[in-house]
Image: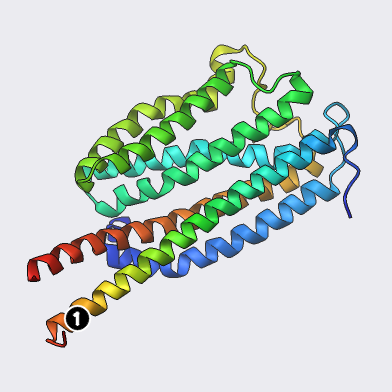
Amino acid sequence: MASLWEYANPVKFMQTSGWLMPVAAVLAAGMIAVGLVWGFFLTPDDFRQGSTVKIIFLHVPSALMAINAWAMMLVTSLIWLVRRHHVSALAAKAAAPIGATMTLIALITGAIWGQPMWGTWWAWDPRLTSFLILFLFYIGYIALWSAIEDPDTAADLTAVLCLVGSVFAVLSRYAALFWNQGLHQGASLSVAPGTRMDWSYKGPLYLCMVGFVMLFIALVLAGTRTEIRARRLRALLTRERAMG
Amino acid sequence: MMPDLGTYAAEVSLAYVVSLALIALLIGWVWARGRRMKRALDALETRLNRKQNGQV
C-alpha cells in the first residue's frame, strides 16, 4: 500500500487529485441535490418548529464542516511544522476560504432560524459566540497568508495561528456541554441508541452531511492544485528573471 | 411544486437562497482561480521552453 507521505510529492498529489477531485465533486453534487430536495420538499413540518426545521439540512452540515475544516487545517499545519511538506501547508491554505464560507453559512442560517424560534437573530450564547470567534480566526488566517510575501514564513505563522484557533474550534463543538447554558441546544444527532430525531429527518440530513464532506474534499483538492500551480509559477518566474 | 411552508416561508426560503448563493460563489471562485492559474502557468512554461530552445 502506498504511503501517505507519497502525496507530499506535488507530482504524485497532482496525479491522484486529478481523478479524485471530479469523483468527489460528482458525489457531492448528487448527495447534496438529493438531500436538499428530499429535505425541502418531502419532509413534514416539525410539531413545534413548523417548516423552519428544513433549515437543519443546511445549518448542521455547514456547521459540521466549519469545525472539521479547521481540524483538517490543524493536522496539515502540524505536518508542515514537523515535516516541512509544502503540499500540506498549501492544503491548509486552500481549506481556509471553504471553512470560512461554511462558518458564515452556519451563522446566517442559525440567525434566520433563531429569529422565529428564539425571538432573536443573535444571542451572546457560548456556542454562537465561539462560532463567531472561529469565523474571525478564519478571516485572520486568510489575511495572514495574504500579508506575508515569503511563503514559508507565511506557512509557519499561519500554522501557529491555526494551533491557537483550534481552541475555539473545540469550543464551538462542545460549548453547549462545557457551559450548559445559553440558547443553543446540544447535539441533535448521536450514534447512541434512542436518539431524538426521526428517520424522516435523519435520512436527508445524513445525505447532506456526507455531501458537504464530499464538497469540502473536492474544493480542497481543487484549491490545493491551484496553490501548487501558483507556487510553481512563482518559481518559474524567478528562473525566467535569472535567465534574463 | 413548492411545499406549503406556512408562517415561516420567508425565513426558510431566505436560508436556502443565501446558503446556496454562498456555496455557488465559493465554487465559482475556486474554479475561476484554478483556471486562471493553470492558464498563467501553461503560458509561462511555453514561453520558457521557447527561450530554452532558442526560439525567442
Report the residue at 19% width, 83% height from top: B50
- Across and down, in percent, residue A24 comes to 53, 61
In the figure, B22 relative to A19: above or below? above
Residue B30 located left or right of residue A162: right
- Across and down, in percent, residue A152 comes to 20, 46
The answer, for residue B43, to whether it is visible in the render is yes
Front-lying residue, A178 or A52: A52
Where residue B46 sits, quadrant-wise, is bottom left
Which element is circle 1 on?
A: helix
The answer, for residue A192, to whether it is visible in the render is no
- Across and down, in percent, residue A51 comes to 84, 36
What residue would you read off at disc 1? Answer: B49
Residue A11 located left or right of residue A22: left
- Across and down, in percent, residue A11 comes to 29, 67
Front-lying residue, A218 or A192: A218
Residue A150 located left or right of residue A40: left
- Chain of the residue displaying label 1: B
Amino acid type, callout 1: Asn
Report the residue at 56% width, 12% height from top: A179
Report the residue at 31% width, 74% height from top: B42
Where residue A103 sits, quadrant-wise, is top right
